[in-house]
Amino acid sequence: MEARAASRLATTAAGEAVFNGQTVCSVLLLDKDGLLRNGASPRRPTAACWSEAARRRSARFPCTLAAMSSHDHSHDHSHTPGDLRHSHDQPAWKHDGVRVIPGNQLDANTAQTPGMNRQAAINFARVGAQKLWAGTVTIHANAKTGAHHHGHLESVIYIVKGRARMRWGEHLEFTAEAGPGDFIYVPPYVPHQEINASPTEALECVLCRSDGEAVAVNLDIEPAEPPEQVLWVDPTHPQGGV
């Protein structure tokens, strides 16, 4: 019985979940630095994979189920939080699954730019997000932000209410406008400025960035006047559109 109790779950270098020498399912792993191991594609072990391994083990050696439920596992705990929630603890994904952030509980303790108010809804500190940041942006009537960029991050802005005028470039020499329902994409390191084009109505937006932490690098730029209007050109708008 001691020999049976010593049976172990493990992963091979190729990223397979192995139980007592038998592959129970294939998973693709990342190393400790988040790099692909042995050319695998970027996906971590799933709860279903480890659950299948546990099922086979408990079916063969029911007397070891209690031992397996303890924290004396042979595998480490480096996989995604919530993948291994034990039945005696709480249901899997109960607090590590879907999260709802009420609109009246946003966090203003985030990187700010003069002329705009940002509030975080989704970030690493609040929900453990590692690859994105999401929140709201408000620019008061007839106001504008200072010039800035967001480092290596990509940004998407969705206009909820009002009219946005964007300026961008080394001297903010380019401009375009967006209204309710429009999306704005800002690539990494692009100097830009958000302007509320309305003298009477607040500009309200939803903002999403490609990292769990907010980055805002404020710039001292003398803007070119007048800026050049840039039309949106893509395969569906070959002549350009505002």
Image (spheres, rainbow, N blue to C red):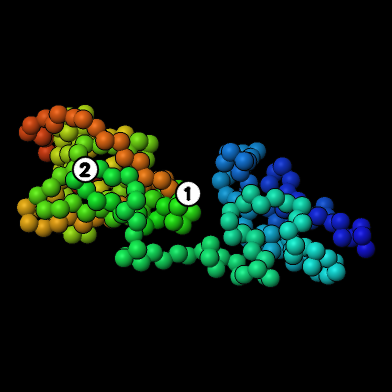
Q: What is the x, y in percent for residue 114?
A: 21, 43
Question: Residue reaching furthest front?
Answer: 109
Q: What is the x, y in percent for residue 95?
A: 53, 65
Badge 2 crowding class, 10 Å Cα cut-off, few under 14, some 14 to 19, many 20 or more, is few
Q: How far separated are the C-alphas under marks 2 and 1?
A: 26 Å
Nearest the eye: 7 or 99: 99
Q: Secondary structure at mark 2?
A: loop
Asked whether the beta carbons under mark 2 and mark 1 sit within 8 Å of each other, the answer is no
Nearest the eye: 175 or 200: 200
The answer to which image quadrant residue 233 occupies is top left
Residue at the (58%, 38%) spot, across then down: 33
Kind of residue at disc 2? Pro
Residue 100 shown left or right of residue 116 in the figure: right
Is 168 above or below relative to 25?
above
Q: Secondary structure at mark 1?
A: loop
Quadrant of the rendering where the N terminus is positioned: bottom right
The answer to which image quadrant residue 159 occupies is bottom left
Q: What is the x, y in percent for residue 139?
A: 18, 51
**Closer to the N terminus: mark 2 or mark 1?**
2
Q: Is residue 182 visible?
A: no
Residue on which disc 2 sits: 114
Residue at the (38%, 36%) spot, across then down: 152
Residue 9's tag is none
Residue at the (86%, 56%) spot, across then down: 6
Badge 1 crowding class, 10 Å Cα cut-off, few under 14, some 14 to 19, many 20 or more, is some
Nearest the eye: 222 or 80: 222
Residue at the (62%, 51%) spot, across then down: 79
Residue 5 shown left or right of residue 149 in the figure: right
Nearest the eye: 213 or 39: 213
Residue on which disc 1 sits: 130
Kind of residue at disc 1? Gln
